[in-house]
Image (tube, rainbow, N blue to C red):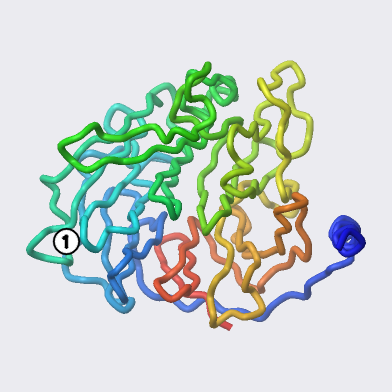
Amino acid sequence: MRHNKLALILAVLSGAWVTPAFPYTAVPIGTFATPVDIRVGPGRPGHLYVVEKPGRIVLLRHEVATAKPFLDISSLVIDAGERGLLSLAFPADYDTSRRFYVLFVNKLGNVEIDEFRRSSSNDLIADFSSRRIILVVPHAGASNHNGGQLSFSSDGLLFISIGDGGTGGDAALNLESLLGKLLRINPLPAGTSAYQIPPGNPYVGRGGRDEIYAYGLRNPWRAAVQGNIISIGDVGQAQQEEVDMLTITGAKGVNFGWPEYEGNRLNDPTRPGPDAPTFPIFTYAHTGGRCAIMGGYLVRDQGLPALRGRYLYGDLCTGEIRSFIPHVGIQAAAGDAPLGVTILGLNTFGTGIGGQTYIAGGNTLYRLEP
């Protein structure tokens, strides 16, 4: 076993596993107003929810949009630049509880997480009057680096990625600030406190905000929890883009390195974190016109067998879609390769109820197929 593991490490680090390009195609599903998140609701077969940055959520039934938006909170949202309605997440009990959560930039410029409920009389729309504010993260100092992704883990806890506020990275190291962090909370039903702090959070009972699960992030635009794996596409500054990927347990209390490091490149040695950095599983340079990573998902799509288990990602500026094989246990990646698909204005990735792979770019939603 030890010899096999060593051989695996050497193969990965030497780049011996080279994966050829895959012939794939992106099939257009529909047109939306800047789609930035794609989700399925547990217990709702055939229902796909597309988050539009101006402030609406559109429900698709078997990939056909319903007549009315599922939710419209445009009256609450700033939609400008990197601001807007950015993410949506459903807990596992959504079918019965009807609860779901959204993350957006509010009219004051702060990052806000709210709870809503699906209508009790109409499964195709949400009840706007059920709105309950769960958490507000002050962010009015800058319009960029909001981050903005919600993901539930299998134990019902909500992970939240937040950008560093666009102020150069100091907030990412400050354990009394929620900016530049990966947060973890336990949302509670109405009639109680908005959320609890999970007792396993690393700063409970010591210095630092109890909501913090990990820190040292710059602009984690897209992040995902799949099984026991957390993956974060953290947008770099001048030279490198990174993917951070760890087990949930392994990410506890981790310093992802910013601003001391950008990717695995020393950026500012005068600003080290309280803990030694954990380096990314994968980085790429700003070459060939690339500028900002759009993080994705580990592929679970039965219809894409050659991609299963690979991490799918792309770049905002080139729109090129690529994938690599992650080896989380040894923090290494192999076989980075293009899919032969380019999506201009790439925004995000998503998965369907059956594991289908979706990509959004510009104003169009696509389904990835061989």
How many numbered tags mark residues here? Answer: 1
Q: Quadrant of the N terminus?
A: bottom right
In the image as oriented, which residue stretches furthest toward the left?
Answer: 121
Where is residue 87 drawn, in percent x and y?
38, 49
Q: Is residue 72 left or right of residue 331?
A: left
Where is residue 257 drawn, in percent x and y?
68, 31
Where is residue 180 drawn, in percent x and y?
53, 31
- In terms of depth relative to the viewer, which is nearer, 195 or 145? 195
Residue depicted at x 64% and y 49%: 245
The answer to whether residue 142 is above or below residue 352 is above
- In terms of depth relative to the viewer, which is nearer, 253 or 218? 253
Where is residue 236 drawn, in percent x and y?
64, 39
Residue depicted at x 45% and y 26%: 210
Q: Say which element carries label 1.
A: loop
Q: Which quadrant would residue 173 be assigned to in this image?
A: top right
Residue depicted at x 21% and y 71%: 66
The answer to whether residue 185 is above or below residue 153 is above
Mark 1, other Cα within 10 Å: few <14 / some 14–19 / many ≥20:
many
Q: What residue sits right under mark 1 in the picture?
A: 125
The answer to whether residue 79 is above or below residue 227 is above
Q: Quadrant of the C terminus?
A: bottom right
Q: Is residue 171 left or right of residue 81?
A: right
Residue depicted at x 44% and y 46%: 149
Q: Is residue 198 left or right of residue 370?
A: left
Q: Which quadrant would residue 279 be assigned to in this image?
A: top right
Q: Is residue 202 left or right of residue 129?
A: right
Amino acid type of the residue that numbered disc 1 sits on in the rendered structure: Ile
